[in-house]
Amino acid sequence: MSVIVSRRVQRVKPSPTLALTSRVAQLKAEGKDIIGLGAGEPDFDTPAHIADAGVEAIRKGFTRYTSVEGIPELKDAIIAKFKRDNNIEYKRNQILVSTGAKQTIYNLIMSVIDAGDEVIIPAPYWVSYPDMVELADGTPVMPYAGPELGYKLTAAQLEASITPKTKLFILNTPSNPTGAAYTAAELKALGEVLKKHPKVLICTDDMYEHIFWAPEPFVSLLTVCPELYDRTVTVNGVSKAYAMTGWRIGYCGGPAAIITAMGTIQGQSTSNASSISQKAALAALNGDQTCVAEMNKHFKARHDFLVAGLNKLPGVTCLPGAGTFYAFANVEGAMKLLGSKDDNAFAEYLLTEGGVAVVPGSGFGAPGHMRLSFACSMDTLTEALKRMDKALRKAS
């Protein structure tokens, strides 16, 4: 008898980033020499003082269930972080700790989206946003902001995308996959549109806040548009800034009613995030932040090197980013040189002929692009550029 899965699951596409990571691992196991530039995680170890806090929690027996929404001392550290870094004030009942920011966003979407509700997701977007919306029976609306706009949605585009069915707007800055970040003026312009539509909820995903090097300091939406406080959920986590991807701790602050609903969803799915990881996250947020600045310095150097190298490849152009550890390159010219039918075929060529794994832009709603992670050493980036150059020039 064949297994019948739900229509909900059938609507969801496999994550292209996870699929690529799995394929690279398989090829390496077969003895192939592959450079993987698809991974979305820092290559640094978790800083010692944070790891030590986790070890201490285990040794002291802090290994049992916690409250679903997170331990009080971690919630207090998150409240202090939002006030210190973003000038946003929350109380404990406005904070939720989850098993990664992905679960945080999933909890939010499942809490506020009903069948037929529309969710505005600017493209290029993080691959999971649209599928999360579809899992909730919602409809993703994905206006495209291309390279001519610096990969940033304009106020006019946002206004044109809002309909009577719009329930939620998701904003990610700095952006995965593009590295683009909105300035205070750009956020203010989007905020002016949102103020005219009081029924639209807002999710701002600030996960890459501290991996940032633009001339103007990072700002969160509520920092410049406090009028939107009563309908905005601000999402963040420790995964990227503190090299803690495997610890799986995300968090958010927002209106108490929405946070309570999100906690209900979480309580019937995973319950609390790992008790050990919560103690480590507490040390991360409250401890010395020098480690964050040091990792950021390396990411900036890698960014500059990779973007410069990509712009020297035949048929490739790449705008500089303001943060994250991704470069997002336009490869339409290179695709024409190769005769590639789409960016998936182009990525396959780089993999088979160059031994370099990149993520096709179509998975992020931006066909004709590729995303490359520079969460790896300079030596790895140098070799990757050399291989890609050789593969492209061989075909041109």
Image (cartoon, grey):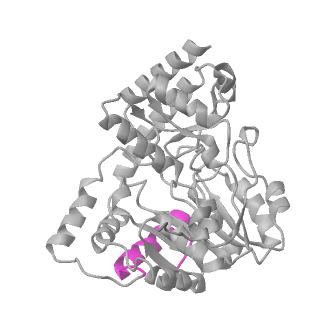
Q: Which residue is at 63% across, 26% downward? A: 316
Closer to us: 123 or 11: 11
Q: Which residue is at 60% across, 24% downward? A: 311
Q: In the rendering, at what x and y percent does residue 180 appear?
A: 62, 46
Residue 149 in the magenta stretch? The answer is no
Closer to us: 18 or 302: 18
Q: In the rendering, at what x and y percent does residue 221 appear?
A: 65, 63
Q: Please say if 78 is above or below 267.
A: above
Residue 81 in the magenta stretch? The answer is yes
The boundaries of the magenta stretch are 69-90
Tell me, yes or no, if residue 145 can be seen here: yes
* Left or right of 71, for residue 227: right
* Left or right of 330, for residue 148: right
Q: Main secondary structure of the magenta part?
A: helix
Q: In the rendering, at what x and y percent does residue 100 appear?
A: 43, 65
Q: Please say if 273 is above or below 209.
A: below
Tell me, yes or no, if residue 83 can be seen here: no
Residue lying farthest left? 59
Closer to us: 7 or 47: 7
Residue lying farthest front? 1
Q: In the rendering, at what x and y percent does residue 61 appear?
A: 17, 77
Closer to us: 306 or 226: 306
Q: Which residue is at 55% across, 30% downward? A: 307
**Residue 39 appears in which quarter of the rendering?**
top left
Image mark count: 0
**Residue 89 appears in which quarter of the rendering?**
bottom right
Quarter of the figure with the C terminus: top right
**Residue 223 appears in which quarter of the rendering?**
bottom right
